[in-house]
Every structure is written in C-alpha cells, then in structure tokens.
Image: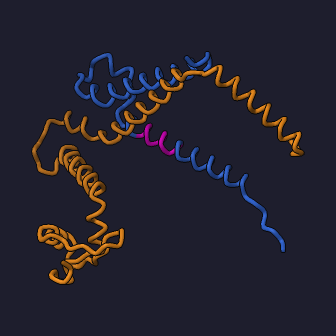
C-alpha cells in the first residue's frame, strides 16, 4: 500500500469529489422537485449559481493551464546565437 | 476492374489505392456532398468512427434542445425543463468528479516496491562510480 501522505491525499481527493458530486446532483436534479417552502432550500444557493459557478471554475482552470504553459515556455526559451 | 467503372465512381484512398465505390455509398455521399472531390469522399469514408460519434452527439444534443427549449411545443411541466436545461454542464461536472475520484483512489492504492527501489539506488551508485572512473565529470 502507498505510504502515509499519498494515502491521505488520495482519500481526501475521493471524499472531496464524492461530496461535490452529491451536492451538485441534489442542487441540479432533486431541488426543482422539492416544495419551495421546504427547509432544504436554505442550504443551497439560488439555481442560477449552479451554472455560473462551474463556468467560473472552468475559466480559472483554463487560466491556470495557460499560465503554467506560458511559464514553462518562457523558462525554456533559448537566446538566439550570434554568428 | 478500374477499366469497367466510370471515373466519377473511383476514389482515392489514403493509402494510395484507387477503389470503386458501391452504388449505395455513391448515392449517400452524393446526397451529402453534391460536388465533392474524391479526397473528401475518401476522407469521410475512412473516418467512420468520427462520423458515428458526431451522429450520436448530435442526436443527444437535439433531444436536449427539444426538451429544454420546448421546440416542438409539447408543453412539458416546468420542473422537467428546469432539470433538463443544465444537463450538459451537469454531465461535464460529474465526469470531472469521476476523474478526480479515480486519480485520488489510484494514488491512495499505489503499491510501493521497496526492494526494487533499493536495487535501483544501488545500480545508480554503481553506474556513477563506473562513469567517474572512466573520466566523466559529475
């Protein structure tokens, strides 16, 4: 089995993704069928955010990937040789 | 075989062979691309997996658009439309969660190989000594 830190990181990733999946599923699929005066609605943001927040996350992810690529390519540039 | 078939039924395959299309294939391609060149014909014939996937995606996309934008005026209940509308985004998010969970699980259950690691370290030391003796500066 993998050692301490690896196991902790892996298990935390699994738990985080399970929580995210459950929360998002309830938000998108189950909440419209629940009466609007039920107490469950207190724990969820308005439904517009269920589209906006993943959009913002996707933009941030693309920004991070772009920044990482730019940094790597900047470090690897070679100065032009002068003949 | 090529002498019997007329020129407009022959097509150039990517591997360089000239083949003759069957009548049904010609009719299908003519309907889609009335003035196609042989290369386009050949390309669409070869990439049938892509065409298959595009067809599947467009069918699912059409079904989603029908339900969420009420294009056929079926007057479904408002809750069903509200659930169907964010479906593409929901599938993307659930795919992301599945990927994250798989990566996390594989990281947690990856096996360490202690003897192999020690052996590798020993071999690295050996190689360094050998190269140093032969004059390579480390």
Q: Is residue A10 above or below residue B30?
A: above
Which residue is depicted at the point 18% across and 36% down? B78
Rendering quarter of residue B5? bottom left
Q: Count up the numbered dots.
A: 0
Q: Is residue B51 left or right of residue B123?
A: left
**Image height check: is A7 above or below A64?**
above
A57 drawn magenta: yes
Nearer-the-camera pick, A53 or A58: A58
Measured from the top left, where is residue B84 in percent x and y?
24, 38
Q: Residue furthest left?
A: B74
Q: Nearer the viewer, residue A29 or B32?
A: B32
Q: Main secondary structure of the magenta part?
A: helix
Indicate the position of residue B20 as horizontal and vertical percent values.
20, 74
The structure residue drawn at horizontal position 17% and vertical position 47%, both measured from the top left corner, is B70
Give the residue displayed 31% in from the left and 70% down from the top.
B13
Residue segment shown in magenta = A52-60
The chain drawn blue is chain what?
A
Q: Is B118 in the magenta?
A: no
Q: What percent of the width, then of the height, locates residue A16?
A: 48, 23
- Image quadrant in which you'd find residue B22: bottom left
Q: How is the image coloured?
A: by chain
Q: Is residue B15 above or below residue B109?
A: below
| Figure quadrant of the N terminus of chain B | bottom left
Front residue of this view, candidates B113 and A58: B113
Identify which residue is drawn at 74% across, 31% down: B123
**Residue B4 left/right relative to A56:** left
Left or right, residue A16 beside residue A44: right
Q: Which chain is orange?
A: B
Residue B15 point in image, percent of width and height: 36, 68
Instruction: Work out which quarter of the rendered image holds the C terminus of chain B and state it.
Output: top right
């Amino acid at each position: 089995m993998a050692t301490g830190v690896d196991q902790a990181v892996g298990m935390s990733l699994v738990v985080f993704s399970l929580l995210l999946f459950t929360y998002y599923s309830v938000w998108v699929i189950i909440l419209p069928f629940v009466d609007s005066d039920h107490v469950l609605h207190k724990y969820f943001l308005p439904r517009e955010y269920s589209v906006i927040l993943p959009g913002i996350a996707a933009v941030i992810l693309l920004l991070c990937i772009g920044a990482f690529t730019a940094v790597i390519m900047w470090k690897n540039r070679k100065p032009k040789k002068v003949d | 075989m090529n002498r019997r078939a007329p020129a407009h039924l022959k097509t150039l395959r990517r591997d360089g062979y000239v083949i003759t299309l069957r009548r049904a294939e010609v009719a299908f391609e003519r309907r889609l691309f009335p003035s196609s060149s042989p290369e386009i014909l050949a390309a669409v014939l070869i990439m049938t997996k892509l065409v298959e996937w595009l067809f599947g995606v467009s069918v699912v996309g059409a079904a989603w658009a029908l339900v969420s934008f009420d294009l056929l005026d079926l007057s479904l209940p408002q809750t069903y439309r509200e659930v169907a509308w964010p479906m593409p985004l929901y599938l993307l998010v659930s795919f992301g969660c599945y990927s994250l969970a798989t990566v996390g699980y594989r990281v947690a259950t990856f096996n360490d190989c202690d003897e192999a690691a020690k052996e590798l370290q020993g071999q690295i030391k050996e190689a360094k000594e050998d190269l140093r003796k032969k004059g390579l500066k480390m």
